[in-house]
Each structure stands twice: as structure tokens, then as C-alpha cells.
Image: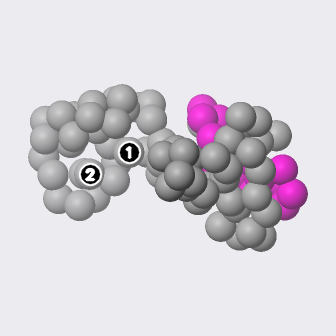
Amino acid sequence: MNDEHGHCPNCKADMNGALIWRTFIERGMLPGEADEKAAMYGATRTKGRWGLQIAIYDMGRDRTTAWQCPYCSETWPRQSHPA
């Protein structure tokens, strides 16, 4: 598996979710439809996973400024890629 999203710096939980394309297939799309939808996310049939980390959004700056682990609630700055 490609480590696209890293791990939580605190609990080391894997932040790589399911394949984006596979999610659309499981929701009933035909392969061609899933190809088109996955491409909107920059994904293919074999590459592109959902990130499990939670975005901490700063409305004043209009951007994600940090990430939070859904398992232990640790937060880390957006600039750093989790270990």
C-alpha cells in the first residue's frame, strides 16, 4: 500500500483510508463511472486513498491549518507530514 497520508505522530495510527475508486464501486457505480469520479480526486483504480485525518479549518485564513487524529485526538500542523 502506498503511504499517502502517513501516521498519527502520537498514537502512530495509519491515516490511509480505502481506495477512492473502490469506494465508488462499492456504492454501486459502474467501473467507467467510478473512473471518472475518482479522476476528480486525482485517483485511479490503483492509486489514491482517502485520508482519515480530520482537517482543522481556519475560517479567517480560509484554509486547513492543522490535522487531528480521529483515534487519539492529537493535532499537528499542516506543514508537517505525520511520521
Residue 34 drawn at (x, y percent): 21, 42
Say if the magenta span includes residue 16: yes
Q: Position of residue 23 (x, y in %)?
A: 34, 53
* Disc 1 + disc 2, Cβ < 8 Å: yes
Q: Nearer the viewer, residue 35 or 58?
A: 58
- Of the pair 83 and 25, the residue shown nearer to us: 83
Q: Does residue 77 appear in the picture of this structure?
A: yes
**Which residue bears the numbered disc 2?**
24
Q: Which residue is mark 1?
A: 20
Looking at the image, residue 70 sits to the left or right of residue 63; the answer is right
> SS at mark 2?
helix
Q: What residue occupies the far front of the structure in this picture?
A: 60
| Closest to the observer, 77 or 4 | 77
Question: Looking at the image, what colour scheme do you see?
Answer: one colour
Q: Amino acid at mark 1?
A: Ile
Residue 69 sits in which quadrant? bottom right
* Residue type of the residue flagged with mark 2: Phe
Q: Position of residue 43 (x, y in %)?
A: 37, 32
Residue at 17%, 59% (x, y): give it.
Answer: 28
**Range covered by the magenta-colored residues:** 2-17
Magenta span dominant secondary structure: loop
Indicate yes or no whether the magenta region holds residue 6: yes
Q: Position of residue 24 (x, y in %)?
A: 26, 51
